Image: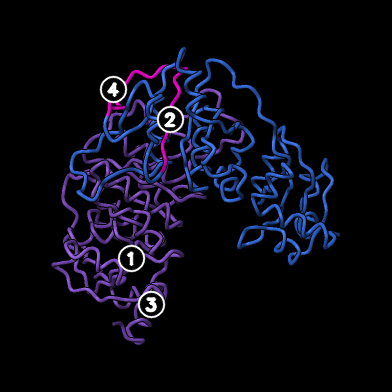
Chain colours: A blue, B purple
Amino acid sequence: MISKNRISEIRKLHLRKFRDESRLFLVEGRKSVEMLLRSELRVVDLYATERFSAGNAALLSDVRITEVTPAEMERISTLSTPPELLAVVEQPGTRPLPEGQPLLVLDRISDPGNLGTIVRTANWFGIRHIVCSPDTVEFYNPKCIQATMGAFCDVQVSRADLVSFLDRQCASRRVLGTFLDGDSVDTFAFQHDDIVVIGSESDGISAPVARCVTHRLTIPRGEGSGSSSESLNAAVAAAIVMHKF
Amino acid sequence: MISKNRISEIRKLHLRKFRDESRLFLVEGRKSVEMLLRSELRVVDLYATERFSAGNAALLSDVRITEVTPAEMERISTLSTPPELLAVVEQPGTRPLPEGQPLLVLDRISDPGNLGTIVRTANWFGIRHIVCSPDTVEFYNPKCIQATMGAFCDVQVSRADLVSFLDRQCASRRVLGTFLDGDSVDTFAFQHDDIVVIGSESDGISAPVARCVTHRLTIPRGEGSGSSSESLNAAVAAAIVMHKF
């Protein structure tokens, strides 16, 4: 049983304002919730459809769950096809960045799907720390969490003023940035503690952040690329650099 | 001036059924339409807001345009923020695939944004021919065309039964496929006329198509990747392979 009041509280978490205030966010769908339950993140509440919880006693044995009807799940979910499982989760506090670990910096990524895909790709390549500019889309946006495909459990995403952050870092570390001109990523000698900066979908890296970049890199076009080819998707560019890195 | 009847005809092109029947599709937004006008695609009609056409006489001088009000543009557009320009365009006929060109094969990609991003990335890397399984999302879906960022002008996307297509090809060419196991793409020696197969977002390459693959490849995880990391986004995996290729 879920009260009307609780439904309305969960629906508030569809909006950033209330996620920011409460420091909570939603995780939806079986796969994402399974990963969540194996992670260190703190689950506040877990909701399952009656049908799901009847058939999955083993999965849910250690967790206090609230059964809801399909209609209730539809109301609390942000998805057009309501999931079987939905969790309300605490946003983890920011931990200090470990020294000498690979680090990705995102400057004004605006699409939640792109941010989620970048986090998912970073996790695949073992990059567990990402610092975003304050105007990057909010990480706890449900579309972003969905696109991480569970990587939200393993990757720490924090926010900082990038200019002062990079100013502090660049005394000891190289700061690489992707541009339409620069050294080819194919021949560049990456180092384990390099910082890689990826810019926004529409305008790339902003001018103040670009001034903090110590090495300009580019992803070369292939022979025979068409004349309409002006840039790569931000998540694709980030993936190619992370793969080389 | 645009008639009510014409508005309703254009709105039908929001739906695949009518795009298939009429062999037409929509291109929306200034950038995409500019690329379209430089391409060999045949534009049937071009609609501009009065405000846009007043300020851009040079751009539109060679083209017959119909001026529409913002309210009319909102009705004919599929975008939540209506564009300044919208074109109705003929779907090009399928040309025979040239010999010895790099070729990408997509098996059951279901998300139009992913397909569009793959086409955009392919164009960047000089891959101008893509063959999709019949159950891959339709290329002329407006979300897909939008995500190509103009690459729909330069890349030929056709559909075929993949098993019979690959059976014919694999006598003379290698067929590479991405799986969770296989040889690392980092050390694999790609050849210019290899065919690369990318599988669906949820299930990878289907079993019948997998049997046509002559070389199994994988994108290795990085050291320290989190336990939630089970796969990469299809557009990201395709980008990493195309970049190596």
Task: State which chain disc 4 sits on.
Answer: A
Q: Residue at 64%, 36% (x, y): give it.
A: A153
Q: Quadrant of residue A49?
A: bottom right
Instruction: Read off the magenta span.
Output: A182-200
Given contact means CB atoms under 8 Å apart, are the residues at marks 1 and 3 in contact?
no
Q: Name the amino acid type tagged 4.
A: Thr
Q: CA distance from mark 1 to mark 3?
A: 11 Å
Same-subunit check for callouts 3 and 2: no
Could you tell me which secondary element the residue under label 1 belongs to?
loop
**Residue, x 70% and y 63% (percent of image)?**
A74
The verdict on residue A183 being magenta is yes
Give the CA separation, mark 3 to mark 4: 51 Å
Q: Residues within 10 Å of mark 4 (few under 14, many from 20)?
A: few
On what subunit does the disc labeled 2 rest?
Answer: A
Q: Please name the residue that numbered disc 3 is placed on.
A: B72
- Estimate the x, y position of residue B242 in percent, counting from the top left: 32, 39
The residue beneath circle 4 is A187
Quadrant holding the N terminus of chain A: bottom right
Which of the two labelled residues, at mark 1 and mark 3, occupies the earlier sequence position? 3
CA separation in Å, label 2 and label 1: 33 Å
